[in-house]
Structures are given as structure tokens and as C-alpha cells.
Amino acid sequence: MNIANAITSVSVAIAALSFVSGVAAWKREFIGKRQIELAESVLAMFYEAEDVIREIRNPISYGCEGKTRKRAENEVQAESQLLDQAYVVFERYQKRKKLFAELRSIKYRFMAAFGIQAGEPFTELDRILGKIFSSARMLGTHYWQRQGRVTMSEEAFQKHLDEMYKHEAVFWWTGDEEDRIDSRMRNVINQVEKVTKITVEKSSVMSVRLPNPLKKR
């Protein structure tokens, strides 16, 4: 091999390595941007979910709420009113269910990008919703129906009240720092923030490094 051919071969090798390196860098940048977009999108949806759950549990109810519930044939008016009151959380959820469906659909993409443990906040969110719905059913079909209508011993009545208040603390948003559901949602948000923190910080760094087209040169 003469010198000219050797130089040509080296040049081709260098060009090939540069190309491969460039593709790898582009791929890392592309994947990084996708992760940043995913992290920001999921974090924003969890923030929204926190607000929506408070809306669902808002103790202020309007007269028309709960009326979409299907009536049983043998329901009396007093029973219907209590069941309708409990159904309010289901009705409000139905109006905002698209958000929770989007979160469920994106869960596995999020886990693929950030690890299996990243799925826990999604699971906990479903548990929280399940807890709210379970308390609503118990209040509407049992505790509120028995209140003042069923004769109980003093001990049984106190137990009834304690359990009813426990479910009402889940059903209604109290707005204070000790609110059980608020506290659980705050933990969920903290988990998502922890998972996405590094990626979101990368986004901030990239934004700082990007040239400002309005800046005078």
C-alpha cells in the first residue's frame, strides 16, 4: 500500500468514525429530548390530577349533582337523596376521566423511560381514587342510611359515628394540612418530582444554553 492509499484509508476511517459518533450523539440528544418531554408532560398531568381530586371531593354540591345515577325500582325519596349525594364524586369523576385515562395509558412508557419503580405513583393514584369511591359507596348505602334510622346501643352508635366520620374524611376535602387524601396525593407528587427531577433539570440547562434569537450580536 502506497502512502496516498494509506492516507485515503485513514481519511475514510476517520470520516466513518465521525459519522458514527455524530449519529450516536444525535441519538442521545433525541432520546434526551423525548425523555424531557415525557417527564414534563407526566409531571404536569399529576399536578392537574391533584387539583381534580380536590374538585371531586369538594364538599359544596349543587342541587342538580348526583341526579344522573340510575334509580332502583323500590327506592324511596329519602334513600334516593342520600344515594345521589354519595354519587356526586362519581359524576364529577366522569367529567374529568379523560385525564386519568391519559395517565394510565402513559404509565408503561414512563416506566420504560425511568424504571419499574416509576410506575408506583400511577398505582397509588388509582388506589386513592378507589378509596374515594369505596367511601362514597359505604356512606351512601350504609352509614348515611342508618344514621338516625336504626336503633343502636350507645357503644354501637359511637362505633357507627367513628367509622362514618372516617369515610367522610375521605369523601370530603377538608382543606387542612391533615387531610388524608391530600397528604397521599402530596406523596404521589413528591415521587413523580423525584423521578423526573434530573431530566427536568437537564431541560432547564439546555434552555439556558440555547441561543436567544432576540439577543443583539
Image (cartoon, rainbow, N blue to C red):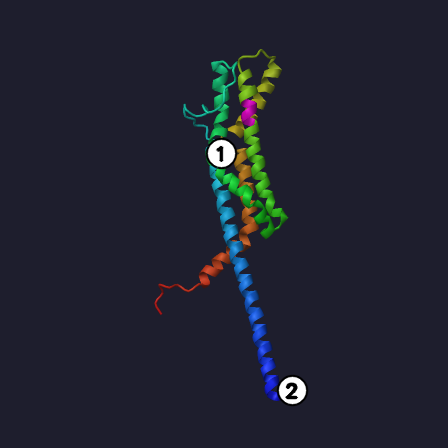
| Kind of residue indicated by mark 2 | Met
User: With 207 as the anchor, is 18 left or right in this view?
Assistant: right
Compute the Cα span from label 1 to label 2: 82 Å
Report the number of numbered marks: 2
Q: Decide whether the magenta segment is chiefly helix, strand or loop.
A: helix
The residue positioned 46% from the left and 63% from the top of the image is 209
Tell me the residue that label 2 is attached to: 1
Q: Is residue 105 above or below residue 181?
A: below
Q: Please name the amino acid that badge 1 sits on.
A: Asp
Q: Is residue 122 left or right of residue 66?
A: right
Tag 2 secondary structure: loop
Q: Position of residue 169 (x, y in %)?
A: 53, 28
Look at the image and give the residue range highlighted in magenta: 135-139
* 10 Å crowding of disc 2: few (<14), some (14-19), many (20+): few
Q: Name the foreground residue: 148 vs 207.
A: 207
Q: Which residue reaches farthest bottom? A: 2
* Magenta-drawn stretch contains 138: yes
